[in-house]
Image (cartoon, rainbow, N blue to C red):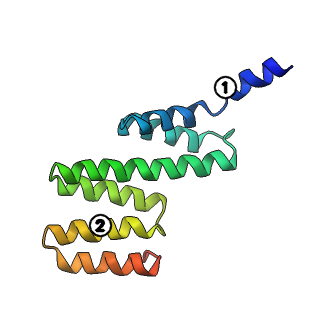
Amino acid sequence: MRLLKSIRNLLGNYQLKSGIYHYDRGESKQAIDYLLRALQAPETSEPDRRMALYYLTQTHIAAAERHEEAKEMAKAVEEYRQALELTPDYPDIHFRMGALYARFGMSLESMEAYRRGRSGRCPT
């Protein structure tokens, strides 16, 4: 009986575990695919859903950072926007977008992003 429980534990939440594995390796596309599947699977528990959402957000942030380093502003902004769709009340993303906008001389957008980060809420 213990063996069966151990096997189920190892095989359970495969999508989440695979997503975290790919996130740790910096493989954004694969991580996003697995983490989205984990969120969409009806058998995923609520704690696993929260963990998948966290890692999915962090994957988008990491991808945006890589795009920033490559000076690909549009791609970085898109990754941050996808992260905000998942977790709109996450101030760090707003601050990162504000810094990105400021770096490219977009002061009005930068100020608005900083404002949203301070309030903790994104206007709908």
Q: Residues within 10 Å of mark 2 (few under 14, many from 20)?
A: many
Q: Earlier in the sequence, mark 2 or mark 1?
A: 1
Query: Is 24 on the left or on the right of 7, as rendered?
Result: left
Query: Is 107 on the left or on the right of 3, as rendered?
Result: left
Q: Is residue 33 above or below residue 102?
A: above
Q: Which mark is residue 10?
A: 1
Q: Residues within 10 Å of mark 1 (few under 14, many from 20)?
A: few
Q: Is residue 60 above or below residue 92?
A: above
User: Of residues 14 and 25, which is closer to you in this image?
Assistant: 25
Q: Are marks 2 and 1 in contact (CB under 8 Å)?
A: no
Query: Is 51 on the left or on the right of 21, as rendered?
Result: right
Q: Is residue 86 above or below residue 10?
A: below
> Mark 1 is on which residue type?
Leu
Q: Residue at x 23, y 50 (%)?
A: 67
Identify the image quadrant of the C terminus: bottom left
Identify the image quadrant of the N terminus: top right
Q: Residue at x 41, y 57 (%)?
A: 83
- Pinpoint residue 65: horizontal percent, then vertical percent: 28, 52
- Pinpoint residue 14: horizontal percent, then vertical percent: 59, 30
Q: Residue at x 14, y 53 (%)?
A: 71
- Quadrant of res 9: top right
Looking at the rendered structure, the secondary structure element under dot 1 is helix
> Mark 2 is on which residue type?
Met
- Circle 2 sits on which residue? 97
- Pinpoint residue 38: horizontal percent, then vertical percent: 57, 39
Q: Which mark is residue 18?
A: none
- Pinpoint residue 76: horizontal percent, then vertical percent: 25, 55
Q: Residue at x 30, y 79 (%)?
A: 112
**Label 2 – label 1 distance at C-alpha:** 38 Å
